[in-house]
Amino acid sequence: MTRRWHTQAACGLLGWAACTLAWAGTLQVTVTDDKGKALADAVVFLDSPAAKAAFKPLVGVEVEQVDKQFAPRVAVVTAGSQVSFPNRDKVRHHVYSFSPAKTFDLKLYTGTPANPVLFDKPGVVVLGCNIHDLMASWILVLETPYFGKTAASGQVALPDVAPGTYQMKVWHPGLPVGNPAQERAITVGAANATATFSLKGVAQ
Ligand SMILES: [Cu+2]
């Protein structure tokens, strides 16, 4: 309540732009490997008790199969999200996961399977195709509204992060299988901020 009152006061006195800045800033994170090379497809997320209380399931998430590859290669969803797996190829695919966070099996199909798959537990889900051994992708299931995936530049912007202290966690599919995200504490204020993160032991 206190924070809302202050924010509305700032809106009235300073206008909408100042209000937005007062409410929450953007955290821009740059991820590199331990040699300083930019890391694409790294997932950056901010965990905290407040973040865990604030996230909601995503709607309309798809992991396509195109040219015998998954797209995107790395997907990020919040727990409770449903994901559909449309097959855009003419050949059939058989998508499966043995991961503890979600075990499932979509037997040989073309088109879009009737039912999306519910991802209700946090963790890393590794996807494969029974027919095409080279097809691989990952779904990261998170319990926070603050997450993003780095571009080729190694950069990602997390918008509208509420001020607070978080564990900033970074995961990449090039980490050894089963390795958890690496993390450190970060305190985010009301203004825009930047951070860097060097991920150890990642192959790229
Ligand atoms: Cu396949």
Image: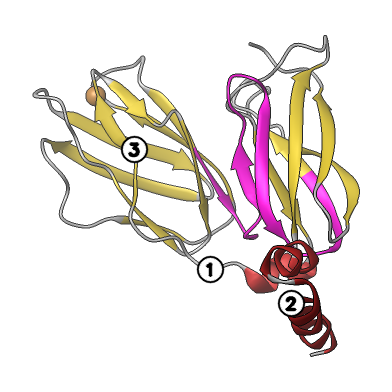
**Who comes first in sequence, dot 3 or dot 1?**
1
The spot of residue 164 in percent (x, y) is: 86, 63
Task: Name above or below for residue 111 compared with residue 89.
Answer: below
Amino acid carrying label 1: it is Lys
Residue 19 visible in the shown view: yes
Please tell me whether mark 1 sits on a helix, a strand or a loop: loop
Q: Which residue is mark 2?
A: 11
Instruction: Please state the extent of the stretch shown in magenta in the rendering.
Output: 139-168
Q: Which residue is mark 3?
A: 96
Q: Which residue is mark 1?
A: 56
11 in the magenta segment = no
Task: Name above or below for residue 201 compared with residue 18.
Answer: above
Amino acid carrying label 2: it is Cys
Name the quadrant containing residue 121: bottom right
166 in the magenta segment = yes
- Badge 3 vs badge 1, beta-carbon distance below 8 Å: no
Q: Nearer the viewer, mark 2 or mark 3?
A: 2
Please tell me whether mark 3 sits on a helix, a strand or a loop: strand
